[in-house]
Image (tube, grey):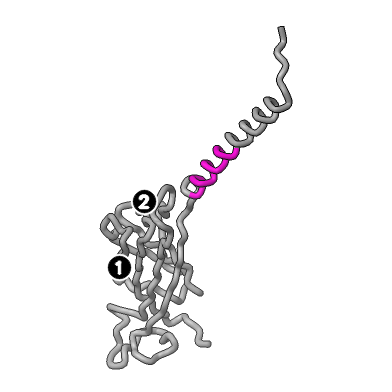
Amino acid sequence: MVALRSDKQVMLIYLYKRVITGICLCFVLLFASQVFAAPILAPTSSWTPAQTGRTWMDIGGVWNGTAEVSATTGDHVTFVLNNTQFPGINQNAYDIKPSVLLPTAAFVYVPNTASITTTGAGCTTPAPTVTATQAPGSPVIDFILSPVGYDLYAQCKMTLKYDIKVNNTGISG
C-alpha cells in the first residue's frame, strides 16, 4: 500500500530540507574563516647610514662622521615582518627563512652584525638566534635562524637588523 502525501506535507518536507541545508551552510561559513585563514604578513624595511644625515652609501668603506668603521660596522638595514592576523587556526607563518637580494655583489654583509628581536602579544616563544652568510661575489645574504623552522605567530613582529657596506668595486650613481 502506497501512502500519498498531501501538498501540504510535500511542502513541509521541502522547507524542512531547505532549513537544514541553510543551517549547515551557515555553520560551515561561520567557521570557514578559521579553517582557511592564513597569516597576514606586513613587511617593512629601512636603511640608516652610519653617519647621521648621510643619504648615500660610501664606496670602499663606511664613515660614521668621525672615523672609518667598516671593519666592525656598516650602514644599518632593518627588516620587519609583522604577522597582523588575529590568533586562531592556521594563522601562523611557518618556517621563516629570511634572505636578501642586494643590488649587486659590491654590497657586502658586515660579519656578526645580524640580530633578531620579536615583539607583540602573539610572541609566545623566544626570538630565534641568527647568523648570516654571503658567498664571495654573490649579492645574496642568507640568514640562518635557530631553531630551524622558526614560526612567526599571529600578532607577533620579528625585527631583523644587519649592516652592509659597498666594497671598492661599487659604482657610484
- Dominant secondary structure of the magenta stretch? helix
The residue sitting at 28% across, 78% down in the picture is 72
Q: Nearer the viewer, residue 130 or 62?
A: 130
The question of residue 159 being in magenta is answered with no
- Image height check: is 49 above or below 131? below
Q: Is residue 138 visible?
A: no
Q: Position of residue 58 (x, y in %)?
A: 41, 87
Find numbered disc 1 in the image and state the secondary structure of the residue it sits on. strand
- Image height check: is 60 above or below 3? below
The residue sitting at 40% across, 70% down in the picture is 79
Find numbered disc 2 in the image and state the secondary structure of the residue it sits on. loop
Q: Position of residue 124 (x, y in %)?
A: 28, 55
Amino acid marked by disc 1: Ser
Left or right of 154, for residue 126: left
The region drawn magenta spans 22-33
Picture disc at residue 2: none
- Image height check: is 63 above or below 72? below
